[in-house]
Amino acid sequence: MRGRRFTVHVNGHPGHHGNVLAFAFLERVQALLGALAHAERNYLGAQFRQTDYEIINAEKINPTQLTLSPVPTARNYDPAAALDWSFEQIERVASGAPVDDRVDEGLARAFAKIVPKEHHTGATAIWVSLDKTVINFDQSFRVRSEAIASMRKAMATKTQWATVTASGSVVGELLKVDDFDGKSEFAIKPVVGPERIVCVYPESRREEMHQFLFKTVRVHGLLHYESESPHPVKVDMHHVEEVRPLSQENHLLNMRGLFAGRARVSDEVEEIFRGL
């Protein structure tokens, strides 16, 4: 187990004789402690942090150093495990190793905020030492943290579909009739969605199915859905019917010229707009 203490080092700027500006120093320390608090909440699954930090040493020799020791704010609570886990995740980000699933988008962005912005004139660098380990919060750390945050966001917004069955129908082209593993099935290529949908039909309908081969059909039955897609993956067929295209004589394009030569009848609406 790690020691209870860790030291925050913040480098100043040559423009200030190597000294770090007060607000810049406080900003960096606050960002680090905020990230540790966020990490503790994620580790515990708690709503509030349960650890504060007492200052046990401070030095102004550039870099400015602040040594902190965790103290519990909740009764009968030992912060050691959460602190160990938090710094382990920070080390993993720094080295490019995979992090725990509990490092969510918010925590990853909190890690990124520890790093000073490039060309910062108040503080140029920050790192932490604990035991014999040194962790640099440099631009590479920021980039890795933001990449983790983006990945977590993408994973969180991925739509999850339910694994269910429901009555309905699918439309598509009947491509082939096969017996898969001794079961009566055929494949249909839907108008939209997956490449094919497996349809199971009653054995008594085997011969009937051949007449629909390579035709567009509508299959009615029990649809099976899985969590990876909003489209059905299989249908247990009740009945099937051919979907015929609209007859040409009913197409609107064939009605061109139907009213040619007839007198146009003016109406009140046309008269109103003519006067505008």
Image (spheres, rainbow, N blue to C red):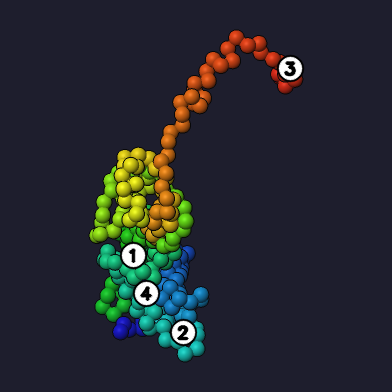
Amino acid carrying label 3: it is: Glu
Label number found at residue 271 = 3
Count of numbered tags? 4
Helix, strand or loop under label 1:
loop
Report crowding for label 2: few under 14, some 14 to 19, many 20 or more residues within 10 A (C-alpha).
some
Residues under labels 3 and 1: Cα distance? Answer: 76 Å
Residues under labels 1 and 4: Cα distance? Answer: 14 Å
Which of 176/155 is in front?
Answer: 176
Mark sitting earlier along the chain (3/4): 4
Which of 66/114 is in front?
Answer: 114
Amino acid carrying label 2: it is: Pro
Residues under labels 1 and 2: Cα distance? Answer: 26 Å
Residue ranking furthest to the top: 261
The residue identified by callout 1 is 137
Could you tell me which residue is drawn at 41 percent across and 47 percent down? 240
Q: Is residue 74 visible?
A: yes
Question: Which-is-in-front pick, marks 3 and 2?
Answer: 3
Helix, strand or loop under label 4:
helix
Helix, strand or loop under label 3:
helix
Question: Label 2 near label 3: C-beta < 8 Å?
Answer: no
Label number found at residue 72 = 2
Mark sitting earlier along the chain (3/1): 1
Mark sitting earlier along the chain (3/2): 2
Label number found at residue 86 = 4
Residues under labels 3 and 4: Cα distance? Answer: 78 Å
Question: Which-is-in-front pick, marks 3 and 4?
Answer: 3
Quarter of the image for residue 87 reads bottom left
Helix, strand or loop under label 2:
strand
Report crowding for label 1: few under 14, some 14 to 19, many 20 or more residues within 10 A (C-alpha).
many
Mark sitting earlier along the chain (1/4): 4
